[in-house]
Image: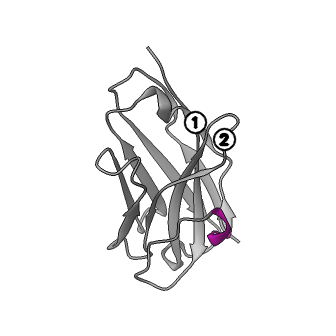
Amino acid sequence: QVQLVESGGGSVQPGGSLRLSCAASGRTFSNYAMGWFRQAPGKEREFLAAISRTGGNTYYADSVKGRFTIARDNAKNTMYLQMNTLKPEDTAVYYCAAKNAPPFVANYVATYDYNYWGQGTQVTVSS
């Protein structure tokens, strides 16, 4: 089993930046493709970005492409989400997720694709 803990959320003004981290423990981190999702109040959980086990392949939702960057450091058992040019509509709880996967595949976009989830971290974008 993999345990995931998100951090780095907070409040930021529109146009600002945040970097979220997802620390993994329990199993070999590099065996898992990873993803970021978010959920705003009253809305379904939304896919944002995913990264392959090796980190060489990434996949983004159109809504964040060009503003958000996913990355991972397998030596540190940690995944990141760099979020730039934040907008009020980016306000949500952000979740990381892990999936048993082949080494180079990243296009896992559905919540049911993932085996493990973190508890989430709140991001609020407001002036």
| Percent position of residue 67, x then y | 32, 44
| Percent position of residue 40, x then y | 62, 37
Look at 49% across and 86% down and name the residue there. Answer: 102
What residue did someone put label 1 on? 92
Look at 64% across and 62% down and name the residue there. Answer: 111
Displayed quadrant of residue 92: top right
Mark 1: amino acid:
Ala
Mark 2: amino acid:
Lys
Q: Quadrant of the C terminus?
A: top left
* The disc label shown at residue 43, or none: 2
Disc 2 and disc 1: Cα gap in Å? Answer: 10 Å
Closer to the camera, 47 or 58? 47
Tell me which segment is drawn in magenta. 111-115
* The disc label shown at residue 107, or none: none
| Percent position of residue 8, x then y | 49, 38
Q: Counting other residues with Cα less than 10 Å from the Cα at mark 2, is it few (<14), some (14-19), or many (20 or more)?
A: few
97 above or below 105? Answer: above
**Residue 87 relative to residue 44: left or right:** left
- Circles 2 and 1: CB distance less than 8 Å? yes
Examine the structure image and report whether residue 83 is included in the region drawn in magenta: no
Look at 46% across and 72% down and name the residue there. Answer: 107
Look at 59% across and 67% down and name the residue there. Answer: 98
Closer to the camera, 71 or 75? 71
